[in-house]
Image (tube, helix red, strand yellow):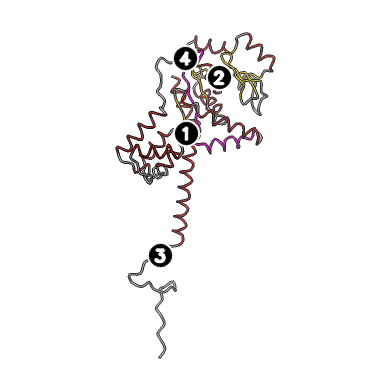
Amino acid sequence: MPEPAAARTPDGTPPRTPGAPTRPPEVDRVAASRRAVAARRERAALKKDVATRVITPQELLRRALADPASPAGAMRVPEFLTAIPAIGEGKRDRILRDLGISPVKRLGGLGSRQREGLRQFLDARWPELEPRGGRSRLVVLAGPTAVGKGTVAAHIKEHHPEIHLSVSATTRTPRPGEVDGEHYFFVDDAEFDRMIAAGELLEHATVHNAHRYGTPRSPIEQALAAGRTVLLEIDLQGARQVREADPSATLVFLLPPSWDELVQRLVGRGTEDATERARRLRTAKTELASQGEFDYRVVNDDVARAAEEVARLAR
């Protein structure tokens, strides 16, 4: 007598034996794998942002504690510590022992005493900014190359006519679309030398070892005398000179959303060749390390939002 055919489900597959484990669909395994890869990439990007000083260690810790399930929260404490400049494996292990934190612990899973201990350790070694009192109406906007200082300053000029935007002098040639007297005063080296000798520049510097930039003094003095706020969009060297000349000036550092975004912006604008881009990125790392000298930090993740924040600080 022939053996009866096995029963089949409507889609033609054999029925599942009661109690047998159900295998997850292949698509679920693929999706889970993709999510894991994306999370690892996000953690790697966050570590890079701490290493290049785009964000402070305290900021990453805040993100982790606010959302333990986020990539920041899922980062293990040893990974976090070694991402911080000047912390190697030996120092990392000593810190973990001193704070009583297990090497397998994740940032988002720290206990209350561990959180407070880690915060105190970070604040003692990398203090965050404390805005100064007695600030003047002279506001300096600086930041690393390709961060978008000019774009943010242009937005402020268009939407806040009460703020006087200083126009710098430079020895470089105009880029496409730039207008003399509106974007910059384009001068040759002889004229720039004359302006320095005559004391006509509030600050001046050679940027990227190539061209010179400077801020004409007279328009700034006139605007301040008239009671207006003055915004200077200049480089790091110039910001330091302004702070020395006027300690009451307000210094604002413009940051990119991430290091990877800064690289993409520099590549995307297409105004430099590969050698020049590499040199500017090296300079950018040094510039990012100087943000602690400034009174405020503003992230340029959206031009309009960043411009409004700078304008608010200028009031």
Q: If you read the primary sequence from the N terminus, does the residue marked by circle 3 or circle 2 appear first?
A: 3
Work out whether 99 lies above or below 183: below
Query: Label 1 vs label 4: CA separation?
Result: 30 Å
Q: Tag 4 or tag 1, which sits nearer the N-term?
A: 1
Which residue position is annotated with label 2?
Answer: 238
Residue farthest along the left direction in this orientation: 112
Question: Which residue matches tag 4?
Answer: 247
In this rendering, which labeled residue sits more in front, label 1 or label 2?
1
Q: Residues within 10 Å of mark 3 (few under 14, many from 20)?
A: few
Q: Position of residue 271 (x, y in %)?
A: 64, 32
Measuring from the top left, give residue 217's x and y in whole percent: 57, 12
Neighbours of disc 2 within 10 Å: few (<14), some (14-19), many (20+)? many
For label 1, the residue is 86
Disc 3 residue type (three-letter): Arg
The alpha-carbon separation of the residues under discs 3 and 2 comes to 64 Å
Is 296 displayed left or right of 154 in the figure?
left
In the rendered view of the protein, which quadrant contains the N terminus?
Answer: bottom left
Tell me the amino acid under the disc marked 1. Answer: Ala
| Camera-nearest label, 1 or 4 | 1
Q: Which residue is mark 3?
A: 23
> Is residue 245 magenta-colored?
yes
What is the crowding at mark 4: few (fewer than 14 residues within 10 Å), some, or many (at least 20)?
some
Q: Secondary structure at mark 4?
A: loop
Q: In the image, which residues are magenta? A: 244-271
Mark 1 near mark 2, Cβ–Cβ under 8 Å?
Answer: no
Residue lying furthest bottom: 1
Quadrant of residue 114 within the rendered picture: top left
